[in-house]
Amino acid sequence: MYAYCYRGGQIEFGEKMPEGALPLGNDEDSKKLMDAVRTNARLAYDNKTLLVPGIPEAGSDDDALEAWRYFREIIEWRLEGRTGFPERKNTIQ
């Protein structure tokens, strides 16, 4: 299963990566992947839609890309069984 998001930050899950989507992670264990994403995502105002933290609030595409990279790294850590949070690497020049 794949977890992915779009520029607006909306997170979705599927068996394939849609064209134009940004990958967040993948794992054969769909429950493990969904738990990792749901635990670290935030909810939209509708209390249903999962969002990548920082993307909806991003003031620029560069800021949104940085938020996506950081969230993707968090998901990678969780899928590896790691706790804590990765160091933030601000790559925006």
Image (cartoon, rainbow, N blue to C red):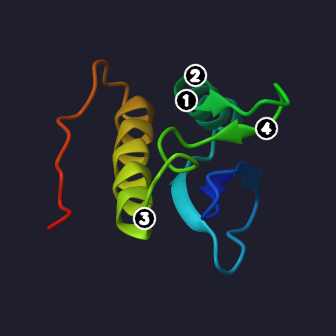
Q: Could you tell me if the residues under marks 2 and 1 are in contact, i.e. CB atoms within 8 Å?
A: yes
Label 4 sits on residue:
49
- Amino acid type of the residue tagged 2 in the rendering: Thr
Label 1 sits on residue:
36
Classify mark 4: residues with Cα within 10 Å, few (<14), some (14-19) or many (20+): some
Classify mark 3: residues with Cα within 10 Å, few (<14), some (14-19) or many (20+): few
> SS for tag 3?
loop
Label 3 sits on residue:
60
Q: Earlier in the sequence, mark 4 or mark 3?
A: 4
Q: Is residue 89 left or right of residue 21?
A: left
Q: Earlier in the sequence, mark 2 or mark 4?
A: 2
Classify mark 1: residues with Cα within 10 Å, few (<14), some (14-19) or many (20+): many
Label 2 sits on residue:
39
> SS for tag 1?
helix
Quarter-of-image position of residue 5: bottom right
Q: CA distance from mark 2 to mark 3?
A: 26 Å
Q: Could you tell me if the residues under marks 2 and 3 are in contact, i.e. CB atoms within 8 Å?
A: no
